Amino acid sequence: MKRRERTRQLIELGGLVVKAGLVELTADDCAVLYGAMLEMAARLRGDEDEQALQLWRRRGQRAFADDVERPGR
């Protein structure tokens, strides 16, 4: 059961990368995507971690809400 849940989580996370347009914007360059994620992780380890989380959470919530209002976007 844990393996199935982990697989679902990984698929959902990959879907978010696609949904954000990062695959197209980086020409599907895994090194660029990984580097960007490492940068994000470093920021979250820094002094402004709560500010970053709040900002990103609000942006994500707005984007999800926009998707519900305008499906197929």
Image (spheres, rainbow, N blue to C red):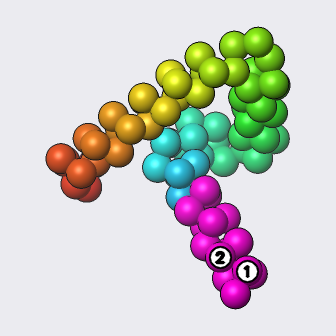
Give the crowd class for mark 2: few <14, some 14-19, many >=20 residues within 10 Å. few
Q: Report the side of 5 relative to 12 (left or right).
A: right
Report the magenta stretch's main SS.
helix
- Where residue 65 appears, as percent x and y from the top left, is 28, 43
Task: Work out whether residue 69 or residue 55 is closer to the camera in this orientation and state it.
Answer: 55
Amino acid carrying label 1: it is Lys
- Where residue 39 appears, as percent x and y from the top left, is 77, 26
Relative to 23, is 8 above or below?
Answer: below
Q: How many marks?
A: 2
Q: For mark 2, give the secondary structure.
A: helix
Residue at (73% x, 80% y) in the render: 2
- Where residue 61 appears, as percent x and y from the top left, is 38, 38
- Where residue 28 appears, as percent x and y from the top left, is 66, 48
Q: Report the side of 63 relative to 48 (left or right).
A: left
Task: Work out whether residue 17 or residue 49 is closer to the camera in this orientation and state it.
Answer: 49
Residue at (26% x, 41% y) in the render: 66
The quarter of the displayed image where residue 53 is located? top right
Give the crowd class for mark 1: few <14, some 14-19, many >=20 residues within 10 Å. few
In 3D space, how far apart are the residues under numbered discs 1 and 2 (Cα atoms)? 5 Å
Q: Report the side of 55 relative to 28 (left or right).
A: left
Identify the residue position indicated by label 1 in the image.
2
Residue at (74% x, 26% y) in the render: 44
Residue 72 appearing in the image? yes
Is the residue under label 2 in contact with that under label 1 (CB below 8 Å)? Answer: yes
Identify the residue position indicated by label 2 in the image.
5
Relative to 47, is 60 above or below?
Answer: below
Magenta span covers which residues? 1-14
Residue at (63% x, 21% y) in the render: 50
Q: Quadrant of the N terminus?
A: bottom right
